[in-house]
Amino acid sequence: MVKLVLWSFFIIPWISLFFLHQLNKSAVRRYMPVALLATVLNTIIYQIAWTYDWWKYKETIFSWDKVAQIHTVYGVFLVGTIWIFYFTFGKFWLYFIINLIVDCIYSFGFRALWKKLEITTAGGNLSPLEGILIMTTIAIILYGYQKWQSDILVENKI
């Protein structure tokens, strides 16, 4: 059951990109760079979390993904970034509020689910509010990056 949940968090977001492609043929290409930056930043955060014992994963998709989990970093976070930017880019406050809501759902909902399913250990060195602060900081960095990328694309008429 646990492996099914983990695989779902990895595969379903990627399948959803086919629907996004039907809505807007260029959206994935337009927002993939910011999603890849989000992936790099999340991988770094996960490495810091591993080092400082913020949490540890007991169950993962593969035996080698104990530090930066495939199902979140390369699944739901990467694809979720594309979807959030598709619906909110150009409207900073909407983007900020949507990100805050998603971060709260993750910090208070999914982290609790992971503990209940014994996917993660309690860790205990990072509170949900500290997690939200980190994710909000990353969201602001990502928005600035996408704004910069969009300005370059407009200047070069790409």
Image: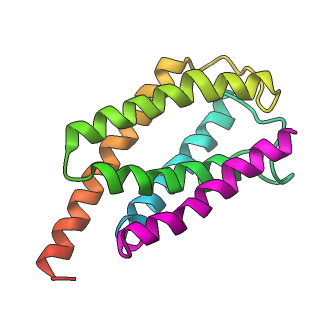
Q: Position of residue 156 (x, y in %)?
A: 16, 82
Membership of 134 in magenta stretch:
no
Q: Is residue 28 left or right of residue 155?
A: right
Q: Is residue 82 left or right of residue 68?
A: left
Image point 64% across, 27% down: which residue?
Answer: 111
Image point 44% across, 35% down: which residue?
Answer: 135
Membership of 16 in magenta stretch:
yes
Question: Is 44 in front, or is 99?
Answer: 99
Question: Is 89 in front, or is 134?
Answer: 89
Question: Looking at the image, how many numbered discs can be counted on the residues?
Answer: 0
Q: Is residue 8 left or right of residue 1?
A: left
Image point 34% across, 57% down: which residue?
Answer: 86
- Boundaries of the magenta span: 1-29
Q: Is residue 153 left or right of residue 41?
A: left
Quadrant (top left, top right, bottom left, bottom right) of the N terminus:
top right
Residue 129 visible in the shown view? yes
Image point 77% across, 42% down: which residue?
Answer: 5
Q: Position of residue 2 (x, y in %)?
A: 84, 38
Question: Is 144 in front, or is 93?
Answer: 93
Q: Position of residue 99 (x, y in %)?
A: 38, 37
Determine which quarter of the picture holds residue 75.
bottom right
Determine which quarter of the picture holds residue 49.
top right
Name, please, the residue furthest toward the left: 155
Q: How would you classify the magenta stretch by its main secondary structure?
A: helix
Residue 69 visible in the shown view? no
